[in-house]
Image: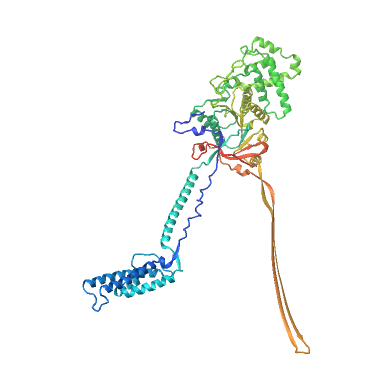
């Protein structure tokens, strides 16, 4: 597995790219919008306040009691101080009288205030400030100061009468109302705090919850096809998928048959992470000996005939020609010494000897020369078409000198043990990358030959298990015929190797290949509407109900009638006349509306959507048992892995049909 931290020279942390799970890329799932607090619509309610008589709430009872006590006290005090005597009070006694009257005035002032509050609709609050409303209590206090024994007595009598009369008028208890207000204010404050906290938590959730979810590589599909896109698209998906595979200990083999430059960034990432990397470029690239290791004459003959007839469209002709060419090559090879090198040069020289030309002494020995000269008799040479076939094969072999640039060791030589994929090397946790590619700048004819050759070398390695890999990626699979691709897929499935095929276009053999062998497909931006339509059809459709027709009818009717009758009667009694009128009217209206719906199939993804995908966007579709499909919109930009709000675990893909 990759180390926890992979830091480049410029300080970039690459560890998230190599971290699990194995993934194509990420799908964005926007979180639910912040929810308002469920309490917002349920504010606290002020409790019911206890009801008491208004006169009691106004304090009139207390005031009247004080007035009663004050009136009695004033009468007693004034009598004792001689106020009611003929001469009146003088001196210190007069001062005492003034003080007593002042107390009576204060009692009268508060009694008048209570009297005002006890009136219908009066304000029951007991303010201490003096204002306009205190004019009457002030006047009452002045009068009481002058004649307290009269005013207080009257007010006491009238007050008790009003108390008895006002018992049925109930008002909220001011004291209880104040307590209710305090309780309501506290509850309201707590309610507002809960709303604020809930909605703040919702905003934090919305701003911090994961939005990017990895879309994993299928664990069941043995073959996956990738279509369309541009160089950046392939580069992005190779980086995202390849880095996560390598970080999880997978061995990757890439056969690059395309003319695109798409593996550079993945090679850079491997170099920064310190992972084993091997790269071979045909023709004549360094490391070719590892690809050709263990090559014998049987393998070479199989590879050569498949390459020579790769463009043959007629299956029967191709099979017959391959059989005959292979038989000739193997018959010639049997004449060569077994301890000699297996190479194109020796095979060509041997074919020249069979044709009657002199072979090179340093390539073909005398014993080999004798055996080759006697291989076919004159009848076979002249009438069996052997010479024509040998000549054609020899000329074709001139294009394959690449196999001799680094000749493989004799016999069953193996791969150096320090190279990725060597037999006996550990399989778990040792992610490595091997890239075998064709020179991009070669001319068309040489490039086509090299592509066919490279594919056959890949197929041989899968069959021979010489370079066991967990995942085989073929870039530019359009250049290989369908039968060869199917052979690769069957072999890889038997060897438990996952296969990813990258196609330039969705057409021809690729259309028939997708979705087979329990496969899956990933669609980038497709070049034209026909290819997009093929992809849309593969993704599938779903049933929906749509309105097919509707009918609406309205009818109205109005009926009215008028009737007037006049009559006269004659008889023995007094005559008379009668007259009558009648009128009737009726109105009616009816409306009918009906609709009908039909079940139709609609594409899950329209072709226009596929044609408008972003550079790093794809639609990934996996075929499940029973034909069901799951689809996901994927962004394979490798930078997403290093961004914020990225989930570490995938979410379940949604069925598309």
| Residue at the left extreme of this rendering | 91
Q: Is residue 301 visible?
A: yes
What is the residue that sits farthest to the right in this orientation?
571
Residue 28: % across, % down = 54, 42
Residue 46: give x, y in percent of width and height: 46, 58
* Image coords of residue 108 (percent x, y): 33, 70
Say which quarter of the image contains residue 361. Answer: top right
407, 195: nearer the viewer:
195
In the rendered image, the vertical position of residue 163 relative to residue 355, given as above or below: below
Residue at 30 percent of width and 75 percent of height: 147
Which of the pair 450/621 is nearer the observer?
621
Q: Is residue 568 left or right of residue 458?
A: right
- What is the tally of numbered marks visible in this picture? 0
Quadrant in the picture for residue 259: top right
Compared with residue 276, is residue 354 higher up or lower down, i.e. above or below?
A: above
Image quarter where the C terminus lies is top right
Residue 560 placement, left or right of 91: right
Q: Give left or right: position of 212 versus 378.
A: left
Outermost top residue: 367
The answer to whether residue 132 is visible is no
Q: Is residue 486 above or below residue 151?
A: above
Q: Quadrant of residue 282?
A: top right
């Amino acid at each position: 597995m990759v180390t926890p931290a992979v830091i480049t020279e410029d300080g970039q942390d690459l560890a998230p790219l190599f971290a699990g799970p194995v993934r194509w890329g990420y799908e964005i799932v926007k979180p639910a919008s912040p929810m308002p607090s469920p309490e917002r619509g349920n504010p606290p309610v002020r409790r019911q306040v206890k009801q008491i008589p208004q006169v009691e709430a106004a304090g009139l009872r207390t005031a009247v009691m004080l007035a009663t006590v004050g009136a009695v006290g004033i009468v007693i005090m004034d009598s004792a101080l001689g106020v009611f005597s003929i001469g009146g009070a003088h001196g210190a006694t007069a001062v005492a009288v003034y003080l007593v009257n002042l107390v009576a005035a204060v009692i009268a002032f508060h009694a008048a205030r209570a009297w005002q509050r006890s009136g219908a609709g009066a304000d029951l609050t007991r303010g201490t400030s003096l204002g306009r409303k205190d004019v009457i209590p002030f006047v009452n206090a002045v009068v009481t100061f002058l004649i307290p024994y009269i005013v207080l007595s009257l007010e006491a009598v009238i007050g008790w009468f009003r108390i008895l009369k006002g018992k049925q008028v109930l008002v909220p208890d001011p004291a209880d109302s104040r307590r209710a207000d305090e309780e309501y204010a506290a509850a309201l404050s707590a309610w507002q705090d809960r709303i604020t906290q809930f909605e703040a938590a919702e905003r934090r959730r919305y701003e911090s919850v994961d939005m990017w979810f990895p879309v994993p590589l299928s664990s069941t599909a043995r073959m996956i096809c990738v279509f369309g896109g541009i160089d950046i698209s392939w580069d992005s998906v190779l980086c995202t998928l390849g880095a996560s595979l390598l970080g999880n200990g997978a061995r990757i083999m890439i056969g690059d048959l395309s003319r695109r430059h798409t593996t550079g960034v993945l090679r850079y990432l491997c170099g920064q992470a310190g992972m084993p990397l091997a790269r071979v470029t045909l023709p004549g690239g360094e490391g070719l000996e590892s690809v050709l290791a263990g090559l014998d004459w049987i393998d070479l003959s199989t590879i050569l005939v498949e390459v020579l007839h790769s463009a043959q469209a007629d299956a029967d002709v191709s099979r017959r020609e391959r059989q005959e060419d292979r038989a000739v090559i193997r018959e010639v090879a049997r004449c060569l010494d077994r301890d000699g090198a297996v190479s194109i040069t020796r095979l060509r020289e041997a074919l020249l000897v069979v044709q009657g030309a002199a072979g090179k002494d340093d390539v073909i020995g005398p014993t080999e020369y004798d055996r080759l000269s006697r291989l076919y008799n004159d009848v076979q040479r002249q009438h069996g078409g052997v010479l024509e076939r040998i000549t054609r094969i020899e000329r074709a072999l001139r294009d394959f000198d690449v196999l001799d640039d680094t000749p493989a060791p004799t016999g069953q030589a193996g791969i150096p043990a320090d190279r990725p994929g060597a037999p006996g090397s550990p399989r778990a946790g040792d992610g490595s990358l091997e890239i075998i590619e064709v020179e991009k700048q070669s001319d068309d004819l040489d490039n086509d030959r090299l592509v066919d050759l490279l594919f056959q070398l890949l197929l041989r390695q899968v069959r021979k298990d010489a370079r066991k890999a967990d995942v085989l990626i073929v870039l530019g699979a359009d250049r290989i015929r369908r039968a060869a691709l199917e052979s690769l897929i069957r072999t890889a499935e038997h060897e438990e190797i996952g296969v990813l095929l990258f196609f330039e276009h969705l057409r021809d053999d690729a259309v028939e290949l997708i979705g087979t062998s329990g496969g899956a497909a990933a669609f980038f931006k497709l070049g034209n509407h026909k290819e997009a339509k093929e992809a849309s059809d593969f993704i599938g459709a779903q049933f929906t109900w749509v309105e097919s027709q509707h009918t609406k009818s309205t009818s109205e009717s109005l009926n009215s009638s008028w009737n007037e009758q006049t009559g006269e009667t004659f008889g023995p009694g007094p005559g008379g006349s009668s007259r009558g009128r009648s009128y009737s009217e009726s109105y009616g209206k009816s409306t009918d509306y009906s609709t009908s719906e039909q079940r139709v199939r609609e594409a899950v993804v329209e072709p226009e959507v596929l044609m408008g995908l972003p550079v790093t966007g794809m639609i990934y579709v996996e075929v499940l048992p029973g034909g069901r499909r799951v689809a996901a919109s994927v962004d394979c930009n490798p930078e997403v892995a290093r961004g914020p709000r990225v989930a570490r675990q995938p979410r379940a893909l949604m069925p598309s049909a």
